[in-house]
Structure formats: C-alpha cells, structure tokens
Amino acid sequence: MTAPLTLYYAPGTCALATRIALLEADAPHDAVRIDFAANAQRSPAYLAINPKGRVPALATEHGVLSETPALLAYVAQRFPAARLAPLDDPFAFARMQEFHGYLAATVHVAHAHRRRGSRWADEAEAIAAMQRKVPANMAECFGVIEQHYMGSGPWVMGERYSVADGYLYTVAGWLEGDGVDIAEFPKVHAHFQRTGERPAVRQALG
C-alpha cells in the first residue's frame, strides 16, 4: 500500500490548493493544521519540518516538499490516473507551470503586502502605503488572468480540470478581503463559482 502523505496547512492560505489536489486525486493522506494564531509555524517542531516556517509542506516517504507549484506538480505526477495535469503534453504542462509561477511569484506577493508588509519594510508609513496599493495591484493581476489565462473552456487548461483550477480558486478567494470585487472579472468569477461546486473543494473547505 502507498504510504500516506502528510499535508501541513493553515486555513485561508495557499495550502488550500494542495488540499484540493490531494482530494481530487483521492490520494491517501493526513492533514495537519498549523495554528498561525499561536505562531505554531515558528515552533521548533514545525521548523524541523519546513525551515521556511510557512505552509504548505507535504511530507512524503522521500522527504518534505514545499512551495505550491511544486506540490501541485507532484500530486499530478504521482497520481496520474486522476488526470490532474497534461502530463503527455510538454508545452501544455509548461503553460500550466507558467500560470502557477504567476500566481506564486506575482499574485501571492501582491496579496501578501496587505498582511505581511513587515517582510519588506519596518516603517509604519511604508507598510501602510503598501497596504493601500494592494487593491490596485490585485486588480491588475486578475486583469492579466482574465485576459490571458482564461480561454474558451470551462477550466484554466481548457476542457479538462487540472490542479491549476484549485490553485486559481484559492487565490481568487482572497480578492474580497483585498478590496477587489471578483465580479469585475466575469471569467474568473464564473470559474470560482464552478470550482466551488466540486465535491473535493467542498470537502477541503469543510
């Protein structure tokens, strides 16, 4: 029997994307909640698992993986029968990874300036200025997604659902808190509603 995986997560974080992927793949795994309110992500026990002190982290029989794009690719490749990525098409797979990279390196960073401004500045006025910029930056990011990554199909990769959809759903769920109306982006909004109806997503949120 395949050894279970262990996902370390916290509600409201990008770890939701990996939780969704594992459930979509019907992958045997345990889920361990890290209490951010208690600063558990900085505890010696958790830092021994992920020295970055962040989630998600996925413990496998070969070691621990972190960073959402890597975890999503791992789940899709480890459980190919679930068909969660275009594994037989190098260009399409790279396109999916391009999208994941944009969410991780650009959109997530824009979002993080609202609550994690101390990563980039110490002065209160500088942090406040970054926070004021978040709605505009997030709206710009989702304008790119709406125009360049949402094609004619129901899913990010076209006609087939993939791990990219759970990731987009996760990040789009931050828009309201960031002061952006998701309805400004009709394709993203429809995708958010469509993805939210999937059983794996409902289970991940439960």
Image: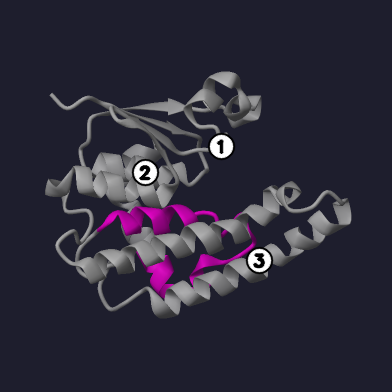
Does residue 104 appear to the left or right of 59 in the view shown?
right
Q: Residue furthest top?
A: 45
Image quarter of the C terminus = top left
Q: Amino acid at mark 3?
A: Pro
Cα distance, mark 3 to mark 2? 26 Å
Q: Is residue 181 magenta?
A: yes
Q: Which mark is on residue 18?
A: 2
Query: Considering only vertical position in the picture, is 70 above or below 87?
Result: above
Q: Residue furthest front?
A: 62
Q: Are marks 3 and 1 in contact (CB under 8 Å)?
A: no
Q: Residue at x 51, y 66 (%)?
A: 182
Question: What's drawn in magenta, residue-wise?
Answer: 162-191
Q: Which residue is mark 3?
A: 135
Q: Are marks 3 and 2 in contact (CB under 8 Å)?
A: no
Q: Is residue 61 magenta?
A: no
Q: Residue at x 75, y 47 (%)?
A: 118
